Image (cartoon, rainbow, N blue to C red):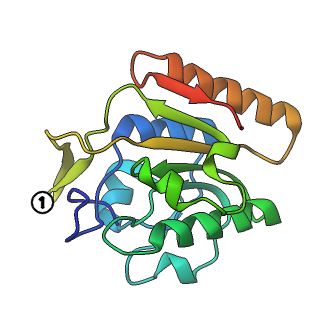
Protein backbone atom coordinates (compact mmCIF):
# COMPACT_ATOMS: atom_id res chain seq x y z
CA UNK A 1 0.00 0.00 0.00
CA UNK A 2 1.09 3.60 -0.52
CA UNK A 3 0.45 6.52 1.80
CA UNK A 4 2.26 7.46 4.97
CA UNK A 5 6.00 7.19 5.30
CA UNK A 6 7.61 3.80 5.58
CA UNK A 7 8.33 2.95 9.19
CA UNK A 8 8.10 0.02 11.52
CA UNK A 9 4.41 0.91 12.04
CA UNK A 10 3.31 1.05 8.40
CA UNK A 11 4.35 -0.02 4.95
CA UNK A 12 2.12 2.46 3.13
CA UNK A 13 3.92 5.15 1.14
CA UNK A 14 3.49 6.83 -2.22
CA UNK A 15 6.15 6.78 -4.89
CA UNK A 16 7.05 10.31 -6.02
CA UNK A 17 5.19 11.16 -9.25
CA UNK A 18 8.34 11.66 -11.34
CA UNK A 19 9.30 8.02 -10.70
CA UNK A 20 5.82 6.72 -11.49
CA UNK A 21 5.85 8.76 -14.71
CA UNK A 22 9.28 7.34 -15.52
CA UNK A 23 7.91 3.83 -14.97
CA UNK A 24 4.93 4.52 -17.21
CA UNK A 25 7.19 5.99 -19.90
CA UNK A 26 9.60 3.05 -19.76
CA UNK A 27 6.92 0.36 -19.90
CA UNK A 28 4.49 2.17 -22.23
CA UNK A 29 1.67 1.83 -19.68
CA UNK A 30 1.15 0.23 -16.30
CA UNK A 31 -1.09 -2.80 -16.60
CA UNK A 32 -0.76 -3.85 -12.96
CA UNK A 33 0.31 -2.41 -9.62
CA UNK A 34 0.14 -5.33 -7.17
CA UNK A 35 0.43 -3.23 -3.97
CA UNK A 36 -1.82 -0.19 -4.21
CA UNK A 37 -5.20 1.21 -3.26
CA UNK A 38 -7.93 3.19 -4.95
CA UNK A 39 -6.42 6.38 -3.49
CA UNK A 40 -2.89 5.81 -4.81
CA UNK A 41 -4.04 4.43 -8.14
CA UNK A 42 -6.32 7.44 -8.70
CA UNK A 43 -3.73 10.07 -7.83
CA UNK A 44 -0.41 8.55 -8.88
CA UNK A 45 -0.09 5.17 -10.54
CA UNK A 46 -3.12 5.04 -12.84
CA UNK A 47 -2.63 1.34 -13.53
CA UNK A 48 -5.22 -0.49 -15.58
CA UNK A 49 -5.54 -2.90 -12.64
CA UNK A 50 -4.31 -2.79 -9.05
CA UNK A 51 -4.54 -4.98 -6.01
CA UNK A 52 -5.22 -3.46 -2.63
CA UNK A 53 -4.63 -4.86 0.84
CA UNK A 54 -7.89 -6.83 0.77
CA UNK A 55 -6.84 -8.52 -2.49
CA UNK A 56 -3.41 -9.47 -1.12
CA UNK A 57 -1.30 -8.96 -4.23
CA UNK A 58 0.95 -11.85 -3.23
CA UNK A 59 -1.93 -14.25 -3.86
CA UNK A 60 -3.04 -12.75 -7.18
CA UNK A 61 -1.70 -13.26 -10.71
CA UNK A 62 0.99 -10.84 -11.88
CA UNK A 63 1.14 -10.03 -15.57
CA UNK A 64 1.87 -7.51 -18.29
CA UNK A 65 3.69 -4.25 -17.68
CA UNK A 66 4.13 -3.69 -13.98
CA UNK A 67 5.10 -1.02 -11.49
CA UNK A 68 6.12 -2.58 -8.16
CA UNK A 69 6.60 -0.57 -4.99
CA UNK A 70 6.33 -3.43 -2.55
CA UNK A 71 5.15 -3.29 1.08
CA UNK A 72 8.63 -3.72 2.40
CA UNK A 73 10.10 -2.72 5.70
CA UNK A 74 7.06 -2.92 7.94
CA UNK A 75 6.38 -6.53 7.01
CA UNK A 76 9.27 -8.92 7.31
CA UNK A 77 10.03 -10.98 4.23
CA UNK A 78 7.91 -8.93 1.83
CA UNK A 79 10.89 -7.64 -0.13
CA UNK A 80 12.19 -11.11 -1.00
CA UNK A 81 8.71 -12.48 -1.54
CA UNK A 82 7.85 -9.61 -3.92
CA UNK A 83 11.14 -9.86 -5.79
CA UNK A 84 10.89 -13.64 -6.20
CA UNK A 85 7.34 -13.38 -7.56
CA UNK A 86 8.33 -10.57 -9.93
CA UNK A 87 11.37 -12.41 -11.30
CA UNK A 88 9.49 -15.69 -11.63
CA UNK A 89 6.74 -14.00 -13.68
CA UNK A 90 9.25 -12.09 -15.81
CA UNK A 91 11.33 -15.18 -16.53
CA UNK A 92 8.14 -17.20 -17.19
CA UNK A 93 6.81 -14.61 -19.66
CA UNK A 94 3.68 -13.56 -17.76
CA UNK A 95 5.32 -10.22 -16.96
CA UNK A 96 6.45 -8.37 -20.05
CA UNK A 97 8.44 -5.63 -18.33
CA UNK A 98 8.56 -3.98 -14.91
CA UNK A 99 9.93 -1.16 -12.83
CA UNK A 100 10.80 -2.06 -9.23
CA UNK A 101 11.19 0.54 -6.48
CA UNK A 102 13.77 -0.59 -3.94
CA UNK A 103 13.37 0.98 -0.52
CA UNK A 104 16.92 0.92 0.68
CA UNK A 105 20.35 -0.33 -0.12
CA UNK A 106 20.16 -3.00 2.60
CA UNK A 107 17.67 -4.80 0.37
CA UNK A 108 20.43 -5.48 -2.10
CA UNK A 109 22.11 -7.52 0.62
CA UNK A 110 18.82 -9.18 1.63
CA UNK A 111 18.23 -10.29 -1.97
CA UNK A 112 21.54 -12.12 -2.29
CA UNK A 113 20.94 -15.61 -3.59
CA UNK A 114 17.75 -14.58 -5.39
CA UNK A 115 17.31 -15.49 -9.01
CA UNK A 116 18.42 -12.44 -10.98
CA UNK A 117 19.60 -10.22 -8.15
CA UNK A 118 18.79 -6.53 -8.90
CA UNK A 119 22.47 -5.86 -9.61
CA UNK A 120 22.24 -8.38 -12.45
CA UNK A 121 19.78 -6.01 -14.11
CA UNK A 122 19.70 -2.27 -14.85
CA UNK A 123 19.45 0.06 -11.84
CA UNK A 124 19.12 3.76 -11.26
CA UNK A 125 20.50 5.14 -8.02
CA UNK A 126 18.93 8.62 -7.76
CA UNK A 127 21.20 11.56 -7.05
CA UNK A 128 19.13 12.50 -4.00
CA UNK A 129 17.03 10.53 -1.57
CA UNK A 130 13.38 10.26 -2.55
CA UNK A 131 10.79 12.21 -0.59
CA UNK A 132 7.83 9.85 -0.72
CA UNK A 133 4.25 11.04 -0.93
CA UNK A 134 1.81 11.06 2.00
CA UNK A 135 -1.97 10.96 2.04
CA UNK A 136 -3.78 14.28 2.08
CA UNK A 137 -7.28 13.23 3.10
CA UNK A 138 -9.49 13.03 0.01
CA UNK A 139 -7.21 15.41 -1.90
CA UNK A 140 -4.14 14.57 -3.99
CA UNK A 141 -1.14 13.39 -1.95
CA UNK A 142 1.61 15.75 -0.90
CA UNK A 143 5.35 15.21 -0.80
CA UNK A 144 6.88 14.46 2.56
CA UNK A 145 9.37 17.06 3.65
CA UNK A 146 11.73 14.40 4.95
CA UNK A 147 13.77 12.37 2.50
CA UNK A 148 14.06 8.76 3.48
CA UNK A 149 16.91 6.33 3.01
CA UNK A 150 18.75 5.71 -0.24
CA UNK A 151 16.59 4.12 -2.91
CA UNK A 152 17.16 2.33 -6.17
CA UNK A 153 14.98 1.67 -9.20
CA UNK A 154 15.41 -1.57 -11.14
CA UNK A 155 14.29 -2.02 -14.73
CA UNK A 156 13.28 -5.46 -15.91
CA UNK A 157 13.49 -4.81 -19.65
CA UNK A 158 10.92 -6.08 -22.08
CA UNK A 159 11.42 -9.60 -23.33
CA UNK A 160 9.41 -8.96 -26.51
CA UNK A 161 12.35 -8.04 -28.70
CA UNK A 162 16.02 -7.17 -28.31
CA UNK A 163 15.58 -3.85 -30.15
CA UNK A 164 12.69 -2.79 -27.87
CA UNK A 165 14.77 -3.77 -24.82
CA UNK A 166 17.75 -1.71 -26.06
CA UNK A 167 15.50 1.31 -26.62
CA UNK A 168 14.00 0.93 -23.15
CA UNK A 169 17.46 0.64 -21.54
CA UNK A 170 18.70 3.74 -23.40
CA UNK A 171 15.67 5.68 -22.19
CA UNK A 172 16.35 4.48 -18.63
CA UNK A 173 19.94 5.76 -18.90
CA UNK A 174 18.65 9.14 -20.06
CA UNK A 175 16.52 9.36 -16.93
CA UNK A 176 19.70 8.81 -14.94
CA UNK A 177 21.29 11.76 -16.73
CA UNK A 178 18.28 14.09 -16.46
CA UNK A 179 18.00 17.02 -14.11
CA UNK A 180 14.58 15.83 -12.96
CA UNK A 181 15.73 12.49 -11.56
CA UNK A 182 19.46 12.24 -12.15
CA UNK A 183 21.82 9.74 -10.60
CA UNK A 184 23.84 6.78 -11.69
CA UNK A 185 22.51 4.00 -13.90
CA UNK A 186 24.34 0.73 -13.47
CA UNK A 187 24.53 -2.06 -15.99
CA UNK A 188 24.28 -5.75 -15.03
CA UNK A 189 27.27 -7.24 -13.22
Residue 83, percent across and down?
58, 63
Q: Residue at x 69, y 24 (%)?
A: 170
In which quadrant is the N terminus drawn?
bottom left
Q: Residue at x 46, y 50 (%)?
A: 102
Which quadrant of the view contains residue 70?
Answer: bottom left
Up the image or down, 32 lies above or below 172; here it is below
Up the image or down, 52 lies above or below 91; here it is below
Q: Residue at x 72, y 66 (%)?
A: 89
- Give left or right: position of 49 versus 162: left
- Give left or right: position of 133 versus 70: left
Q: Which residue is drawn at 81% across and 48% down?
A: 159
Up the image or down, 168 lies above or below 79; here it is above
- Give left or right: position of 90 versus 1: right
Residue 120, percent across and down?
70, 45
How many callouts does the rendering have? 1
Using a 10 Å C-alpha cutoff, classify the residue at mark 1 as few (fewer than 14 neighbours), some (14 to 19) or many (20 or more): few
- Who is closer to the viewer here, 128 or 45? 128
Residue 188, percent across and down?
71, 37
In which quadrant is the C terminus drawn?
top right
Which quadrant of the view contains residue 150?
Answer: top left
Can residue 25 be seen by looking at this rendering?
yes
Can residue 47 be seen by looking at this rendering?
no
Q: Return the residue at label 1.
A: 137
Disc 1, SS: loop
Amino acid sequence: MRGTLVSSETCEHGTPPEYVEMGRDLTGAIDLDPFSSSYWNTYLVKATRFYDERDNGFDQPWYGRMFVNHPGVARSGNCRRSWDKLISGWMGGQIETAVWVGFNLNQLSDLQGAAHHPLQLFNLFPRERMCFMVRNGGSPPVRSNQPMHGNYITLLPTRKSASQAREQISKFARYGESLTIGGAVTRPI
